[in-house]
Image (cartoon, rainbow, N blue to C red):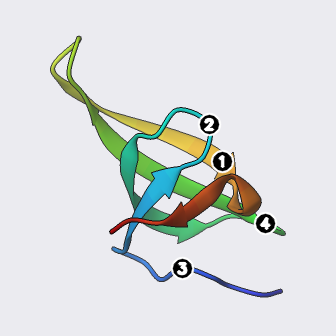
Amino acid sequence: MRRLFRKGERVRSKIDGKVMEVLKYIKNNFVEVKWFDLEKKEIRINKIKEDKLSKAA
């Protein structure tokens, strides 16, 4: 299994452009990420495929 990102690294979603932080790898190419939701003012956690993410600048 290839791992493009490390735990704690900042990544950008190719879907909506949100900057997220990598929490852990789950299965083949699935990454658990967290980000801050500005509308609800809380932290969200989600699972996203690795190919839908890129490194944040």
Q: Which residue is mark 3?
A: 5
First along the sequence among labels 1 and 3: 3
Q: Which mark is residue 15?
A: 2
Q: Nearer the viewer, mark 4 or mark 3?
A: 3
Q: CA distance from mark 1 to mark 3?
A: 13 Å
Q: Earlier in the sequence, mark 2 or mark 3?
A: 3
Residue 4 in the image: x percent, y percent? 63, 82
State the residue position of label 1: 48
Reading the image, the residue beneath label 4 is 27
User: Relative to 10, is 4 above or below?
Assistant: below
Residue 45, image x, y percentages: 44, 40
- Packing grade of label 1 (10 A; few <14, some 14-19, many >=20) is some
Q: Distance between the Cα atoms at labels 4 and 3?
A: 14 Å
Q: Amino acid at mark 1?
A: Ile
Q: Earlier in the sequence, mark 4 or mark 3?
A: 3
Find the distance from the CA under tag 1 to the CA under tag 2: 10 Å
Q: Residues within 10 Å of mark 3 (few under 14, many from 20)?
A: some
The residue that appears at 60% across and 46% down in the rendered structure is 14
Q: Secondary structure at mark 1?
A: strand
- Write the residue at 47% across / 83% down: 6
Gap between marks 2 and 3 measured at Cα: 17 Å
Placement of 31 over or under 4, stated as above or below: above
Answer few, some or many: residues within 10 Å of disc 2's Cα (few below 14, many 20 plus, some between 14 and 19).
few
Instruction: Give amino acid for label 4.
Output: Lys
Q: CA distance from mark 4 to mark 1?
A: 11 Å
**Residue farthest to the bottom?**
2
Q: Is residue 4 above or below residue 42?
A: below
